[in-house]
Amino acid sequence: MNQFVSPIKIITGEGSIVKIKDIIEDLNAKRVMIFADPVIVNIGQTKKIESILDEKKIDYKIYTEISPEPPLEVGDKAVQAVKEFQADLLIGVGGGSCLDITKASSVLANHEGNVKDYLNLYGTKSITEKGIPKILIPTTAGTGAEVTDIAVFSLKDTKDVITHEHLLADIAIIDPELTYTLPPKVTASSGIDAFTHAIEAYTSVNATELTDVLAQEAMRKINSHIRTAVWHGANKEARKEMAWGSLIAGLSFYNAGVAGVHALAYPLGGLFKIPHGESNAVLLPYVYDYIWPACLPKMKKIAEVLQLPTENKHDREIALSVVQYLHDLVKDTGLPTSLKEYGIQEKDIEILAQNGIEQKRLLSRSPRPFTLDAVKSIYQAAYEGKLALGQ
């Protein structure tokens, strides 16, 4: 038996942010807190929302004390701010970290304790109340945070998550116009993040026919448009297709789950503060260089989606061509393809591996089981920047 879960309502299209006016009326909101990345406020991307709230004479507050890869303290402060303002609607506008903070704050404002108490690995409390209604509006085409029930937090040397269906957005708004000003590096890292969501969902042991359809289309759209979006950012068609690809990748991975790439990326973010999208990108080809023997039929289909030659080739050869292509895709977007480029040293592999193998929730979805030695070998390959390709 399979199930598919998503936010109650998803609104898409250029200029769709104006639908907030109708949503506020439907929810009868009186006190609204806008969570936004500081740069988003500085470049005026919350102005439309503010003007709607002003027109409706609704009390609101803009909260910008948000940081990438947020530590627990950032989450705790945000929850307290919601309680003090007594908000009855939260609107998150920004990247994945901003949306995660919005989700966590909406639920934990109605609970006792701190963010740490509700973490997947270390928490001791359970979420019981739905919390405050929330609208999530991404400004990058990548994280999928607007359609998942996950909030990620950085710990001392790794990451952990709060995950519960109550964290799902009441309404997600995907407006490609908000991505038009993204710089190349952010476009690249968020785009590869979305591609990773799609490919990991597709090869997940929890994949279904529905998640497969979404994942394949997401891979197709992102692969076809990411290079244009990165290097020719004014191309609105590429931006629109990337936004759509990110959305359906998010729906796919929320239901099928991500696996080894994300599991091993978490310690890179926790220990070395490498942004999440870049952490996924630098590990993507090396993880698939390890797992391909366990998902040959899926690898063959991925090759077709990516329009790689398959005629008169053995499945093994096709799978290895996908692995090489993943490496080239990351390189084409201008992102690093080795851990050395981030200043990571060979001696760091041991602690990375120890932390990575603890991400059992994610690793359990991999078609090929991970051992500590396997994790070490993947980090070693990523450190050296060399694919094994079946050797």
Image: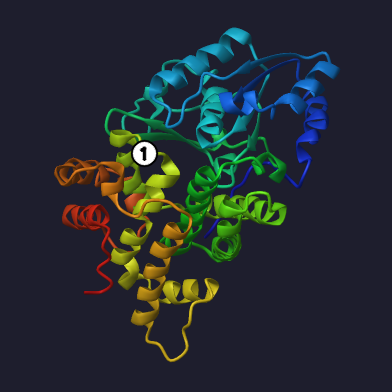
Name the foreground residue: 171 vs 3: 171
Q: Indicate the quadrant containing the C terminus: top left, top right, bottom left or bottom right.
A: bottom left
The 10 Å Cα crowd at callout 1, few under 14, some 14 to 19, many 20 or more, is some
> Going by the picture, which residue comes out furthest to the right?
55
Q: Secondary structure at mark 1?
A: loop
Name the foreground residue: 251 vs 118: 251
On the image, which quarter does residue 131 sit in?
top right
**In this rendering, position of residue 225 left or right of residue 205:** right
Image coordinates of residue 281 in percent, x first then y, are: 41, 52
Q: Residue at (26%, 45%) from the top-left corner?
A: 356
Q: Residue at (43%, 92%) from the top-left corner?
A: 312
On the image, which quarter does residue 359 sit in?
top left
Image coordinates of residue 46 in percent, x first then y, are: 70, 26
Vertical relation: 127 (above or below) 172: above
Image coordinates of residue 364 in percent, x first then y, are: 33, 53
**In this rendering, position of residue 226 left or right of residue 27:** left
Name the foreground residue: 334 vs 28: 334
Q: Residue at (40%, 18%) from the top-left corner?
A: 73
Vertical relation: 31 (above or below) 381: above
Name the kind of residue labelled 1 in the image: Ile
Residue denoted by label 1? 274
> Going by the picture, which residue comes out furthest to the top?
84
- Asked if one can make out residue 125 in the rendered structure from this viewpoint, the answer is no
**In this rendering, position of residue 315 left or right of residue 129:** left
Asked which colour scheme the image uses, the reply is rainbow
- Asked if one can make out residue 227 in the rendered structure from this viewpoint, the answer is yes
Q: Residue at (42%, 72%) from the top-left corner?
A: 299
